[in-house]
Image (cartoon, rainbow, N blue to C red):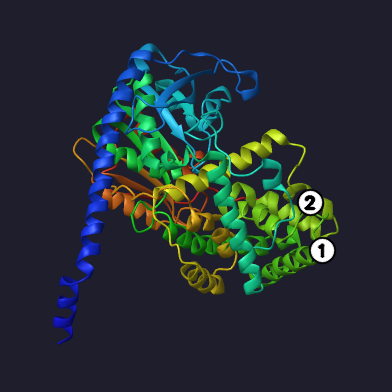
Amino acid sequence: MIAATLIAGALAAPAASAYEGRDRDRDEVRGQERQQIGAAIAATRAAEAGVDWKDCPTDWGLPKPIQCGWVTVPLDYAKPFGKQIKLAVDRIGHTGTPEERQGALVYNPGGPGGSGLRFPVRVTAKNPLWVKTSKAYDFVGFDPRGVGHSAPISCIDPQEFVKAPKMDPVPDSEADKRVQRGLAAAYADGCAERSGEMLPHMTTPNTARDLDVIRAALGEEKLNFLGVSYGTYLGAVYGTLFPDHVRRLVADSVVNPSREKIWYQANLDQDVAFQTRWNDWLTWVAKNDAVFHLGDTRAEVEEQWRTLRATAKKDPLGGVVGPAELIGYFQSAPYYDSRWVPVARVWSQYVAGNTQALVDAAAPDLSDTAGNASTENGNAVYTAVECADAKWPRDWRTWDRDNTRLHQKYPFLTWSNAWMNLPCATWKSKQHTPVEVTTRKGLPPVLIVQAARDAATPYEGALELHKRFKGSRLITEENAGSHGVTGIANPCVNDRVDTYLLTGEVDRKNVSCAPHAAPKP
């Protein structure tokens, strides 16, 4: 009887909405097909135009012999002959012999909202991790659409954006939640007012199409790509849309590419992983109590954190560092092992009576107008891409339920993350259906690198991408959690990345590596 009722219901009124859903999916597919045709047209034009390489503008802060240029792409790939925007690119030539050259290696550091223009500096700085690879490849960076020098977008006055102290992200009442909801809605409105023309086109698939146009402008038949963090999702979407244009693809610290994760659930998963890595750091601080004097058990160090938070909430340190600013500073420790010692040292100085050290570290520099503009731009792009890539819950009750539940066990980042993403609940521009990341004909083996305890991109994302990209290989750095594994000295990882980029070879099976050296206070 119940089954019959369900079947009858499925054949009645809901069928109309089901057809509407199919129509929407069909429209999305047709739109993607038009955009792919537009991308082919734009790539053909770019191949003919190339890049007019010149010395970089002085205010870009890039040392010689790095060169800079521009690649022109359509704002809307469905209208390839419509409005165009220019993307900033830079490069440094390979350091080896002509016979050693294997093309260009293009880089994206993540975000969304990160600039890749500093990538060639790894060569000028003679970074030892990249000496072998730089003999074979030109190192190429770029500002993705909306970022930095590439038709930058904005959602709020930068000086207003960095003003401190901000409201405590952990709400004490429903009234606090209403204020935060109002701030998020105002931010979404600001994005529409200041950057409305760009917003519908600020998607990962469009950035992947931009990447293919850059490939063509560089004169490369196939792309060599290194993506970190969000850059792995960009690479995964590129590998799905342009599988036969991939030569080498390294995905380092992987965003879960599942449609069900992009982007609402991915951020909830991140809250759990951040708490895990935060606890790892607190445990390490406790083990080094002889140096930091913050407590010799994790519980004692955690209590110091709660005390610091409460103190800053009651009376912001230096008048500018409240709980929000503390989280902004302290979250770098669970992000990167390289931040374990500096953050613990500043905290230790505070407990010893040096409040100014913590104020200097955590407070915004209102005099740094260029830096503040870059910070605001990065946040605007982050918001624009994540809000445009996928459909987000519109009902506040969903957000309230999920984040209230998570906060009970994973309090470090949950509410802060929620407010950062809440503009997507009232986003004015179209929210698309994410690309179904999958293996398509022509895709070569992809190399995936991941720390098992990564906070920003939980390990499950690497497993999911490995499952979706057939023939890929996964290198796991066990018992480690630093974000961006290819930038850390660990020969087990570094040698395999070099081998892959230089020869295309991967191990016959997935590899587990011991962790890199732990930070020493």
Q: Is residue 466 above or below residue 100?
A: below
Can the viewer see residue 432 in this picture?
A: yes
Apparent side of residue 378 relative to residue 478 in the rendered image (left or right): right
Q: Which mark is residue 296?
A: none
Residue 23 horizontal/vertical position (percent):
23, 53
Q: Quadrant of residue 125?
A: top right
Q: Is residue 110 above or below residue 72?
A: below
Query: Which element carries disc 1, helix, strand or loop?
Result: loop
Q: Residues within 10 Å of mark 1 (few under 14, many from 20)?
A: few
The first of marks 1 and 2 along the sequence is 1
Residue 66 horizontal/vertical position (percent):
54, 18
Residue at image position (29%, 47%) is 437
Can the viewer see residue 454 in this picture?
A: no
What is the CA distance from the residue labelled 1 to the residue labelled 2? 13 Å
Front residue of 209/9: it is 9
Query: Which element carries disc 2, helix, strand or loop?
Result: helix
Apparent side of residue 301 relative to residue 80 in the rendered image (left or right): right
According to the picture, the residue beneath numbered tag 2 turns out to be 359
